[in-house]
Image (spheres, coloured by chain):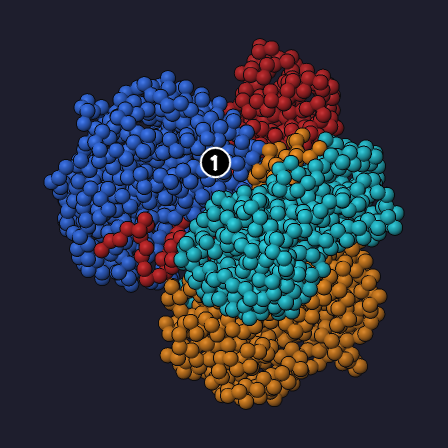
Chain colours: A cyan, B orange, C red, D blue
Amino acid sequence: MQRCLTVTVARHSRLLAHRAVSVRQAAAMSSLLISQPKYSWLKELGLSEDNHGVYNGTWGGSGEVVTSYCPANNEPIARVRQATMAEYEETIQKSREAWKVWAEVSRANAPKRGEIVRQIGDALRKKIKVLGSLVSLEMGKIYVEGVGEVQEYVDVCDYAVGLSRMIGGPILPSERPGHALIEQWNPVGLVGIITAFNFPVAVYAEVLEQNNLPGAICSMTCGGADIGTAMAKDERVDLLSFTGSTHVGKMVAMMVQERFGRQLLELGGNNAIIVFEDADLNLVVPSAVFASVGTAGQRCTTTRRLMLHESVHDTVVERVAKAYKQVRIGDPWDRNTLYGPLHTKQAVEQYLAAIEKAKQQGGTLICGGKVMDRAGNYVEPTIITGLPHDASIVQTETFVPILYVLKFKTEDEAFAWNNEVKQGLSSSIFTKDMGRVFRWLGPKGSDCGIVNVNIPTSGAEIGGAFGGEKHTGGGRESGSDSWKQYMRRSTCTINYSKDLPLAQGIKFE
Amino acid sequence: MQRCLTVTVARHSRLLAHRAVSVRQAAAMSSLLISQPKYSWLKELGLSEDNHGVYNGTWGGSGEVVTSYCPANNEPIARVRQATMAEYEETIQKSREAWKVWAEVSRANAPKRGEIVRQIGDALRKKIKVLGSLVSLEMGKIYVEGVGEVQEYVDVCDYAVGLSRMIGGPILPSERPGHALIEQWNPVGLVGIITAFNFPVAVYAEVLEQNNLPGAICSMTCGGADIGTAMAKDERVDLLSFTGSTHVGKMVAMMVQERFGRQLLELGGNNAIIVFEDADLNLVVPSAVFASVGTAGQRCTTTRRLMLHESVHDTVVERVAKAYKQVRIGDPWDRNTLYGPLHTKQAVEQYLAAIEKAKQQGGTLICGGKVMDRAGNYVEPTIITGLPHDASIVQTETFVPILYVLKFKTEDEAFAWNNEVKQGLSSSIFTKDMGRVFRWLGPKGSDCGIVNVNIPTSGAEIGGAFGGEKHTGGGRESGSDSWKQYMRRSTCTINYSKDLPLAQGIKFE
Amino acid sequence: MQRCLTVTVARHSRLLAHRAVSVRQAAAMSSLLISQPKYSWLKELGLSEDNHGVYNGTWGGSGEVVTSYCPANNEPIARVRQATMAEYEETIQKSREAWKVWAEVSRANAPKRGEIVRQIGDALRKKIKVLGSLVSLEMGKIYVEGVGEVQEYVDVCDYAVGLSRMIGGPILPSERPGHALIEQWNPVGLVGIITAFNFPVAVYAEVLEQNNLPGAICSMTCGGADIGTAMAKDERVDLLSFTGSTHVGKMVAMMVQERFGRQLLELGGNNAIIVFEDADLNLVVPSAVFASVGTAGQRCTTTRRLMLHESVHDTVVERVAKAYKQVRIGDPWDRNTLYGPLHTKQAVEQYLAAIEKAKQQGGTLICGGKVMDRAGNYVEPTIITGLPHDASIVQTETFVPILYVLKFKTEDEAFAWNNEVKQGLSSSIFTKDMGRVFRWLGPKGSDCGIVNVNIPTSGAEIGGAFGGEKHTGGGRESGSDSWKQYMRRSTCTINYSKDLPLAQGIKFE
Amino acid sequence: MQRCLTVTVARHSRLLAHRAVSVRQAAAMSSLLISQPKYSWLKELGLSEDNHGVYNGTWGGSGEVVTSYCPANNEPIARVRQATMAEYEETIQKSREAWKVWAEVSRANAPKRGEIVRQIGDALRKKIKVLGSLVSLEMGKIYVEGVGEVQEYVDVCDYAVGLSRMIGGPILPSERPGHALIEQWNPVGLVGIITAFNFPVAVYAEVLEQNNLPGAICSMTCGGADIGTAMAKDERVDLLSFTGSTHVGKMVAMMVQERFGRQLLELGGNNAIIVFEDADLNLVVPSAVFASVGTAGQRCTTTRRLMLHESVHDTVVERVAKAYKQVRIGDPWDRNTLYGPLHTKQAVEQYLAAIEKAKQQGGTLICGGKVMDRAGNYVEPTIITGLPHDASIVQTETFVPILYVLKFKTEDEAFAWNNEVKQGLSSSIFTKDMGRVFRWLGPKGSDCGIVNVNIPTSGAEIGGAFGGEKHTGGGRESGSDSWKQYMRRSTCTINYSKDLPLAQGIKFE
């Protein structure tokens, strides 16, 4: 899920650029993919063997060098030189200066912001294929997902253009003669974003510079925990947005709360599909497969728990397992591939450990369970049945393609199991029963931020608010009134009369 | 500011009842005010010498006994026996059970909730004078403020009745054929409220019982830090609302964040009035007096900083000081009184300490500065000039009637000073310049939650959202979309077709 | 459906008072019901043998005398002396004067309007039983409906109280520096209402007078077509609301359009229930009976067409017919009665004529069809099958309890038949198929203003907007944003800067 | 003001294409401008000597031939062959067929509509200069206005893209257990637009065809009163939008009301600027000049009445008159020109007649008043003082550049004069007094749809709703919730339970 551009384009901080990398030791050797003719398209994006990890109007970076590896073959793609703490400090200062310019733009001319966002969206639209390919190469997402991710980005830009002429509070009736009561929304200030993976800062930079706006309106500092911690604690960062694990998210949240900053958390999910006895299995099977093996189980909205009514349990397990075996595994950039590698070697280890635990806790391996015998971080998509709903491994989000199948008897039971995990991101039921659908949507139904019916847990639309409750962090991005998280509200009363009616009828002087 | 009843009526927890008390040693002696004929009206409220500090459907309390003293004379009013931890536990359990019933009411019949709230409002309306008198006696607010506080409560009830047929999310256009995209809002669950002072739980109880609803829908456990801490850490409390100091608020917030709970904080303010050269001084003077000495400087929205343009500085100081001297000081329940006591003896000490610090930091005492020679916690309303805007005492919220007068030269300077304190609750300018008014409302104007023009910092209307930014905690209560804080949002997608269009055009099985 | 009080309480004109009457020749004889001890409760409402037909701050009426008859026995209840044209003129003038006062109330203090409406609601709540009885006696509605009608009124008042602190437009982002863009809503002015039947003006008058407001804020002039025509053509009437037949509604609409006035029409309906093969017949049967015989077929939302899928046609006809025979017919004020008389003798004639036509066009009488052998305008509730969907009598709204049963084969056919009539008020389907439900709600589903699923065509809630499309007139009352019909919108741009950026970059002078 | 594309792109009818023309006798001679090398750029737009006046998927036109003349020189530009009634009939039929396809798009995939609109906006953006030039050549607007008009169009498209993911009603709380209450908005159906001047249908056609959608989604039939009347009376046209004179607008409105169709009227204005004693004259003078002579006085929002406080009357008249003399008159396509011709010869006659009447009624000519001695329909921009505010010529909208200057004494007087004309489109005050500003916005202020402060009457932004009250017709276009006029609302209640709680507690069967 890309984040709402309405206002975030504006401010900010540690955006990992499209040249961003995961933190590993620098590749000493010279055989970088970018130097191979096959990957020369990377240069269309302005990348080279050594890349800058800082942007704040000018490109820089003089810290540690890290290398980005392709998860499909563990070959090094290119190197990035990260930010030092001094560069972080410089970047924040330049961002604050840039904010003054940008605030003037928005104060003077809110729809002008929209125009900048429109141009960014158009610039992304033009590069959609090559950006999609980069996502595929560096993250291991299959090509159609890589392109889809950029498309979602573009859609959010288009959406934000419209929003730029709409956002605002109501004028409310005042109970006092000669007074106007107005709800005013202003941009919150400097927004810091701690995010993993790609973020196409270079495109922002291009557009900002073309419009004679300071590039530092959208800065970036690649770095590790030191930079992240600095941002979380930095009083100059008015809003801190964090997407990542619940574990790190909690640490960030505590640091931000300590200084009464604002935070926007998009953390983990332990998402379930519930299949009732009256479900259309022709919808269930592709949904379950798509949502559990898509992106190799590495979406925040991946289905991790498949709850099956006892009457359809065996049938569905059989059909899903059969489908699993037909999933085309291969290089993510190959247009035929449906399933790529895990993102890191550590994820492979977590995969193996989770399978071991699941067995210990009573699980039965229906399919998968092994690391694949090929280059890159490939593991078999895995189905495990027979675990109790409250087994500790079932209650844990492991960010890999393991699907736990649970058998239930009643609606109440299934809804309760859905809600008993710590996270509250996404959830689905499959049923034809309208009464059940509305119960599912109601106060005793799903406690998640995303509540689906007859579609899987993944695949949200940008028009709605995206995010989840409980340990998922509570943040909302994209549509509906998510823009309010990037704004602050003032309740304004203007006395335009010559009298002063004091509250509660009190008279002074 | 009373809190929004739309949904809070529902759930609950540590509500200090109308028999609530501040925590002090129990009064051993028998001469309680309640036993004196003059205060026999307290019995209309069902109070007696010894009162229950727990309500959860039945009244109880077997913990420490505390005595409530009248701040106007430090006489004991009555005693309350607080909750033990076991009673807290029992209350939470009964509240959770009650929630199941109440959720069924709201799920089945949302406007039915409105009807209950309407009855509560009507019950309060009938008791408005005697409840107002109790506020006056126990808190030291002047009578008209005491009644005004209850009236505000009643108004919020009326408002919430209307709201009960309106709240809900939009239906959004889906980009997928045969899909409906719906934003559903459900009540958040059990709401805990840590609040000081009065809270008329008995009225709730009456109404709930008349409607055959469990009284535990609105429970109360009087207690100290132990009960408060338990609530903050309790995973069964879905939302924790805290009104009080920034210091305690931060501790509460950290405990709630630690468990990824929801919080709603209404903390301190260090509110300024800015008077420009073109201001109508006939509005300025009563505003400044009302907002700085009203409630003896003990409102969260009290004006603590009065910034005067150099051209009007001396005139305004003189006129305000003159008005200060005419403020009628007396028993708060006396209808002529405009100024009553501080709430506790500790506050008197804080008052003296603040004056001492202000002098050390360069301040000049214009009027006030002394404890008054009469029974009760009375101190003189105080004006101090000559301090630098960034003096540490000026930057500190001391919850007493001391007004720091600052002299400024330019609009930019004044706006910057307004924003440089940690808190962000309320703020006012006095001017006739429309350009300035809109700059004040804009992104480079006030950073507070309440932004006024030609009225003082206190005295909000219930139709707007009440609350502040930064160290004020960020919570919003009462009007506008404040109800969303008591609800949780689900973004729901319903596939009502027979097809499954997967995101990003992927095809499975 | 009562009309929204949010703003209409304000203005005014030809409200038939609770002493209102239908226009017939004056009863010469003395044996009025009101003079009988059994009906002495009518005097609680301030009624007497001869009543005033004009209110505009004072009560008057010197025009034609009409007598109100009880439709259950055709006995005269009491007499009303209607307005002359001179009294109409005086009333409008006094209303315009009153408007100036009331506009000042709303401008000064919008929530004050809410408080007046709250008091009106409370006054109605106190008289609910006796007002409900009057409805029953004069209109022939059964008692529970009479009371229900007043309850709905009260609910609208409660709703409007909340609304009085909420209504207002947004503040929009301006594309011009130093400009504010605001959408302001103001009350539309004098509202004229042409309505049949009861309208409790006396209650309004009581409340207005207690609040020292001019009674003419809510005036009334009983009269015939002359008064109605005068109102429709009167430029001083800013909004004209008309509830009644499509025939008269069109004439009124043309007169108002001619002068570019505003109109709000609530005209007829020819409402259908569609029963699909998968419907729950336990819901269908009582729904069909309730909606077709309730209020003896004299609701605008009465079901007039019952479309049955061929597979359930015979079963449903049989069960509905059986239920028809069990409907308890009697005096409307008898608590056991479910079915009362037609409102007028003319309606009895229309009933007979319609049955005759239906037979001629091929219809078969399943039950009913005859005038009943008892005092009053009682006719048998009637079911007719076998007519083609496009028979002219089926396409006609006859305001009597005749239900035409149609047999259909496909969803497309049923939806098309639903939409082929001129009116577009209410419509229902009964089904368990979620796909069908959403198709029914969509652009190719029902074209009515009220679109129900598994409930009958009648029985709307006040939180929604009430009204219909096409020949139903297009007006909306009650909930949602219906208040906008009583308001006018201004799009306001305020330049608060010292510069003038002309549109399209043009420079002058 | 371009009309909102949100939904109108969809349906349609009599759009005068970019090859549209005003109705005059066909030019027999061959010397068409389009055939001259200087105007060869017209061919970039696909125009030729003879053009089709019908589009409904294919281009056609076999009716009367009309010639379009350039108002700056009265030379013929090109010829158009208009629609016959048979072609109108065919077009409507094809539009209804196209609607079925398009409704399926919107039902299936609302944001897909947005994508089509986005492409249309982009296509217009690419042709903005040549389209602007055509406007200039054919309408006589100056070049910067011509381009500005197209830019506004493009902005509306961008706005509508965002809207396509947002529009929808609320989900409301139901008072009945097991019921959902939903407000659903669907497109209204076929929209007919009667408009003068240019409408770039060819661009729509291009985009629709590229997307494999029927071109008849956006059809056009050029024609005279016969075609317009047919559309107004045509029951297949669900909404009729008319922009033009009040005189014709009323006839159209009556025809549409007669059939209970929907209408959206944008008729005339008689707009005033009010200048108070405290106004900033540096804003007043360019505003008055821009708004009165811009587009040679032929905007619906042109300032026709300039009300000056007596204290500034003479000064302002003098300065405005001086500025009038500096207005650069010339060929509209010349980039230096600020003032072009009237659109038709009839307008020149109306200009002369109005000046004559004004003199008769007591007016004094300050400047202008004569037809200019050059080719084309050029008249001098004219200022007339000394007329009474209620002179009949002042109360009349004459669509030419005559400005009536009125002298007033009090605010009440000025506001009353503003409101006393029949039209209610646009209005402005110039003042620094904040109290006056809010009174101007309030219920006793301006009764217009557009209410400005310190900017002139013309130059609205697309984010707000555009349109006016009273004889201006009441329609609203562009921003805010104007989209609702192109949609119809259903209030939907879904019973998803197994029970049927009848309204008012009635029990049947």
What residue appears at the point 46 percent right and 66 percent down from the top-left corner? A97
Tell me where residue C427 appears, x and y as whole percent.
60, 29
Instruction: Identify the amino acid type marked 1.
Output: Ile
Tell me where residue B40 appears, x and y as whole percent.
72, 72
In the displayed structure, B63 sits above or below D240; it is below
- Outermost residue on the left side: it is D373
* B295 displayed left or right of A377: left
User: Where, by quadrant of the figure, is residue B486 drawn?
Assistant: bottom right
Between A35 and B19, the residue placed more toward the observer is A35
What residue appears at the point 48 percent right and 42 percent down from the top-left corner? D161
Q: Which quarter of the rendering shows the N terminus of chain D?
A: top left
In the displayed structure, A245 sits above or below D42; it is below
Q: Which residue is mark 1?
A: D116
What residue appears at the point 31 percent right and 23 percent down from the top-left corner? D82
Tell me where residue D42 appears, x and y as whole percent.
28, 33
Q: Which subunit holds the residue at mark 1?
A: D
User: Where, by quadrant of the figure, is residue D12 drawn?
Assistant: top left
